[in-house]
Image (cartoon, grey):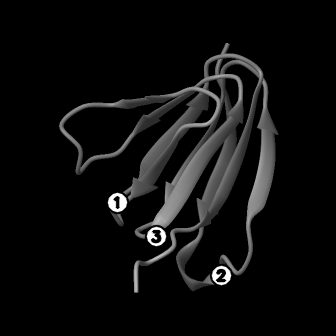
């Protein structure tokens, strides 16, 4: 069963990191997420972003920088803890 936890409109509202726990099949829709980094702390994540040719699969310790402003889906394949934060821009 897939459970939609809703849409996070990140935009300029994301000030500090958010840590979320998702059960298998739960997913988030992200909007206005360009420049956001998603890190998998435990479990396994599936990310589909319209601007990428292939979907991303993240395991613990891996992260992805999201570049699209279009709707992006993030789904837990296993019980997962993930972190969402602004990506650090190199100086």
Instruction: Return the mark for residue 32.
Output: 3
Q: CA distance from mark 1 to mark 3?
A: 7 Å
Circle 1 Cα neighbour tier, 10 Å, few/some/many (<14 / 14–19 / ≥20): some
Q: Indicate left or right for 20 with 39 as reference.
A: right
- Residue 43, relative to residue 27: is it above or below? above
Where 40 sits versus 7, above or below?
Answer: above
Residue drawn at x 43%, y 70% is 35
Q: Which residue position holds label 2?
A: 13
Tag 1–tag 2 contact (CB < 8 Å): no
Q: Residue at x 55, y 48 (%)?
A: 29
Query: Residue 73's spot in the image, x, y percent?
Result: 48, 41
First in residue order: circle 1 vs circle 2: 2
Percent coordinates x, y for residue 6 in the rendering: 67, 48
Q: Nearer the viewer, mark 1 or mark 2?
A: 2
User: Looking at the rendering, in which quadrant would you find the C terminus?
Assistant: bottom left
Q: Which residue is mark 1?
A: 70
Q: Are discs 2 and 3 less than 8 Å apart at CB? A: no
């Amino acid at each position: 069963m897939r459970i939609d936890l809703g849409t996070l409109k990140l935009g300029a509202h994301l000030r500090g990191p958010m840590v979320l726990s998702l059960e298998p099949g739960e997913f988030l829709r992200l909007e206005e997420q360009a420049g956001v980094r998603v890190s998998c702390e435990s479990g396994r994540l599936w990310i589909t972003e319209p601007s990428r040719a292939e979907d991303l699969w993240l395991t613990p310790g891996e992260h992805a920088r999201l570049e699209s402003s279009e709707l992006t889906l993030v789904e837990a394949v296993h019980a997962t803890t993930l972190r969402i934060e602004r990506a650090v821009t190199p100086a």
